Image (cartoon, helix red, strand yellow):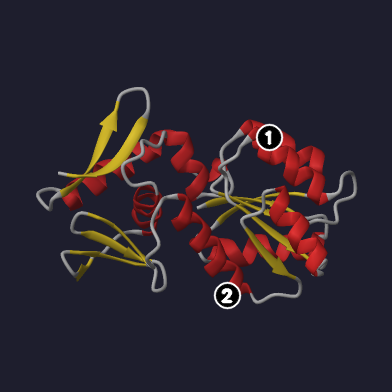
Amino acid sequence: MRILLVEDEHTLGTWLCKALERSGIIVEWVDSARTALAALGARAHDVIVLDLGLPDLDGQDLLARIREKDALVPTLVLTARDTLADKVRAFHAGADDFLAKPFELQELEARLHALLRRARGAQAARLGCGPLTYDLASQRFALNGEALALSPREFAVLRVLIQHSGEPMSKQQILERVVSDEKDIQPDAVEVIVHRLRKRLEGTGVRVSTFRGLGYALETA
């Protein structure tokens, strides 16, 4: 999962980037409405986490602009403004969820995964594609009920594919959800990882398919 964090408090932003990335959530952090709009125009994100107290534009107004650009991307408002009026206005502006500061990291992570599941049309705490399942709570893959051993990079790429099961993902889209700094890995390395995953999934009833010009998608065989 790749999220866009719009937060102008640098201590909180730095901590959230590190804490969420330890859980496999890639964070692109910006500290203003201007940079948030630029980031949204440059690349896709699975979820937006938005503070309302921004220096250059009220977060509620930014939320309305986000909805004009993308009516579907899930958005969670994370703010110290927790009055009923703030919540109602945020939901009317297009927020999908609202979490007041201070908050527990575990609850934020759970809400992010829930937003992604709802966006993908799945309500369960387990994602699946044929005999392959991924448990969001334990962060483990299973194939036909048996634990699937994967290297860290294989795990990260397969998690992206199952979160977007049936939807072609380009190498760049996969890369953006696997590492926070794209200098750490080149797009061509995704091909190598996908090749390894295909070997592991061969003959199991699930496969990674190639869609020319679009990318890779996890499908039932």
Give the amino acid type for the residue marked by disc 2 in the picture.
Gln
Q: Residue furthest left?
A: 203
In percent of width and height, residue 149 lies at 26, 64
- Mark 2, other Cα within 10 Å: few <14 / some 14–19 / many ≥20: few
55 and 118: which one is in front? 118
Numbered label tally: 2
Mark 1: amino acid: Glu
Q: In the figure, residue 8 lies in which quadrant? A: bottom right
Tell me residue 134's x, y (percent): 32, 63
Residue denoted by label 1: 68
Residue at x 66%, y 33% (from the top left corner): 69
Circle nearer the N terminus (2, 1)? 1
Q: Residue drawn 27% across and 32% down?
A: 210
- Residues under numbered marks 2 and 1 in contact, where contact means CB atoms less than 8 Å apart: no
Residues 170 and 220: in front is 220
Estimate the spatial distance between the alpha carbons at disc 2 and disc 1, rounded to whole Å.
Answer: 31 Å
Q: Determine whether the residue tagged by mark 2 lies in a helix, strand or loop.
A: helix
In percent of width and height, residue 141 lies at 29, 64
Image quarter where the C terminus lies is top left
Q: Is residue 147 visible?
A: yes
Name, please, the residue furthest toward the top. 213
Residue at point 85% right, 56% down?
53
Answer with left or right where residue 219 lies relative to residue 144: right
Secondary structure of the residue carrying tag 1 is helix
Vertical position of residue 212 compared to residue 197: above or below: above
Mark 1 burial class by Cα count in 10 Å: few <14, some 14-19, many 20+: few
Instruction: Tell whether 10 sits left or right of 95.
Output: right
Label ID, residue 106: 2
Image quadrant where residue 102 sits = bottom right
- Residue 51: percent from left, percent from top: 77, 57
Disc nearest the viewer among 2 and 1 = 1
Q: Is residue 32 visible?
A: no
